[in-house]
Every structure is written in C-alpha cells, then in structure tokens.
C-alpha cells in the first residue's frame, strides 16, 4: 500500500478531526478518568491492531494515551493508519 500524498492526508483528516499530523505520523492523545481506563482502552486498541496487522506506537501517561500511526513498511501514512484511527475513535 503506497503512502498517501499530502493532499490525500489533508482530505482524510476531515473524517478524524481529533487527529493531527506530527513529524510524519497521524497522532491523537486520548484522555481518561484514570489509569485503569487508559489501560482498558490500550487493550482494546491492541486487539484492533492485532486484527489489522497494523500496530501503533502507544504512550500511556496515567490518564492520557497517545497513539501515533504510520505505516513504516510503506514509508509514510496510508489508508491503514486512517482506518485504525477511526476504529480507535469508536472505542471512546
């Protein structure tokens, strides 16, 4: 799957408005009430990622979870990243 162009990325960001591009990655920070809620979310994202064969970088800071998506083997952001972003959004 080839990486998306800047124009394609910009047009797809409309569908996931809480996400942004940072250093070539599709990124969002999710906020939860506590660490347990953060962990529960991360486990659900992990299940989605395993099913898709596409794994995000995950940073957990107590009640904050930062997901960073990029398709490394394609050398950039692909539709896979936007699909996983949309799926993660539905978990909240």
Image (tube, rainbow, N blue to C red):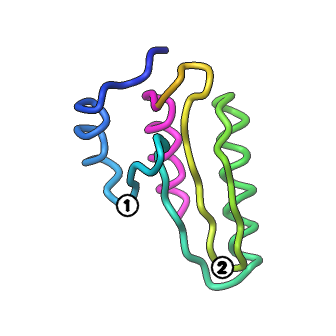
The residue at 49%/59% (across/down) is 28
Image position, residue 92 (x, y; %): 52, 65
Secondary structure type for disc 2: loop
Query: Looking at this rendering, what residue extends furthest in the bottom direction?
Result: 33
State the CA–CA distance, disc 1 to disc 2: 17 Å
What residue is shown at x 47% (from left), y 56% (from top)?
A: 89
**Of pointers 1 and 2, the one earlier in the residue sequence:** 1
Start-end of magenta stretch? 77-92
**Quadrant assignment, res 7:** top left
Question: Is residue 43 or residue 14 the one in the foreground?
Answer: 14
Crowd tier of the residue under label 2, counting other residues whose Cα lies within 10 Å: few below 14, some 14–19, many 20 or above: some
Q: Is residue 90 above or below residue 5?
A: below
Question: Residue 47: image x %, image y %?
Answer: 72, 44
Q: Which residue is mark 2?
A: 63
Q: Is residue 6 left or right of residue 34?
A: left
* Horizontal side, residue 43 vs residue 86: left or right: right
- Categorize mark 1 by other alpha carbons within 10 Å: few (<14), some (14-19), many (20+): few
Residue under numbered circle 1? 18
Q: Is residue 28 above or below residue 72?
A: below
Q: Position of residue 76 (x, y in %)?
A: 49, 28
Q: Relative to 72, say whether 87 is above or below.
A: below
């Amino acid at each position: 799957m080839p990486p998306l162009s800047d124009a394609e990325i910009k047009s797809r960001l409309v569908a996931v408005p809480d996400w942004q591009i940072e250093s070539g990655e599709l990124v969002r920070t999710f906020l939860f009430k506590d660490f347990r809620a953060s962990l529960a979310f991360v486990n659900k994202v992990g299940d989605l990622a395993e099913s898709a064969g596409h794994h995000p970088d995950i940073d957990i800071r107590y009640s904050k979870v930062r997901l960073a998506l990029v398709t490394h083997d394609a050398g950039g952001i692909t539709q896979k990243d936007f699909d996983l972003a949309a799926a993660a959004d539905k978990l909240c």
